Amino acid sequence: MLTALSFLAAAKIAEKIGLVNTMVFTHIPSNILLMIVPLAPNLPLAMSLYLARMSLSQMDVPTRQSYTVAIDSPEERVFAASFTNLSRNIAQAASPSISGYVLQFLSLSYPFFIAGGLKVIYDLLLYSRFRTIRPPEEQHVKSQANGKSRGHI
C-alpha cells in the first residue's frame, strides 16, 4: 500500500526537483533504511524502518520510466523501456538465490547490508552519469523557475 501511494508522491516530487533527483534522492534514504533494519533492537522498530523504506523504495520506478521515455527518440522508446525493465527483473530473479547463500553461510543481516550497499552505489553512479541530461519537460520547468515559461512533467 505504501509503495503504491509513493508512485503518486513521486510525480509531485519530480515536478519540483526533477526526475533524476527524485530517483536518487528518494532511493538512497530508502536503501539506508534497508541497511538499518537488521540493526533495530526490537521488532516494532524493525517493522517501522521497513515500512518507512517501502514508502520510498519504488519512487524510482515511475520516474525512471518517464525519464527513459523522455530522453529517447520515439523509435528507441520501446527497446529502452523493455531493456531497463528486463535488466531489473533479471536482477530480482537472481537475488533470492544469492541471498539464500549469504543467509546460509554468513549472517542473517548481510543480505540487508549487501542489497542496500549495492543499490546506493547504483544510485550514485546513476546520478553521476545522468544528472546533467534533462528531458525536454524539465527544461521547461527550469525555465519556469527563471520566470520564462510554464511546463509540466
Image (cartoon, helix red, strand yellow):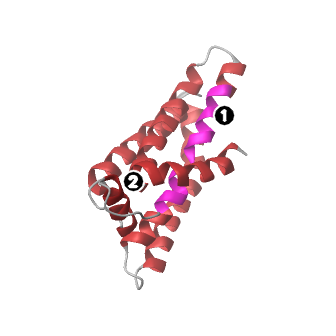
Magenta range: 48-64
- Residue 31, given in percent of the width and then of the height, sits at 49, 37
Q: Which mark is residue 51?
A: 1
Q: In the rendered view, would you say 53 is above or below 44? A: below
- Mark 2 or 1, closer to the camera: 2
- Residue 46, given in percent of the width and then of the height, sits at 65, 24
Q: Residues within 10 Å of mark 1 (few under 14, many from 20)?
A: some
Query: What amino acid does circle 2 point to?
Result: Val
Residue lying at 38% horizontally and 59% vertically, measured from the top left: 141
Residue lying at 49% horizontally and 58% vertically, measured from the top left: 63
CB atoms at circles 2 and 1 under 8 Å apart?
A: no
Query: What amino acid does circle 1 point to?
Result: Leu
- Residue 49 within the magenta-colored segment of the rendering: yes
| Dominant secondary structure, magenta | helix
Residue behind mark 2: 20
The residue closer to the viewer here, 102 or 20, is: 20
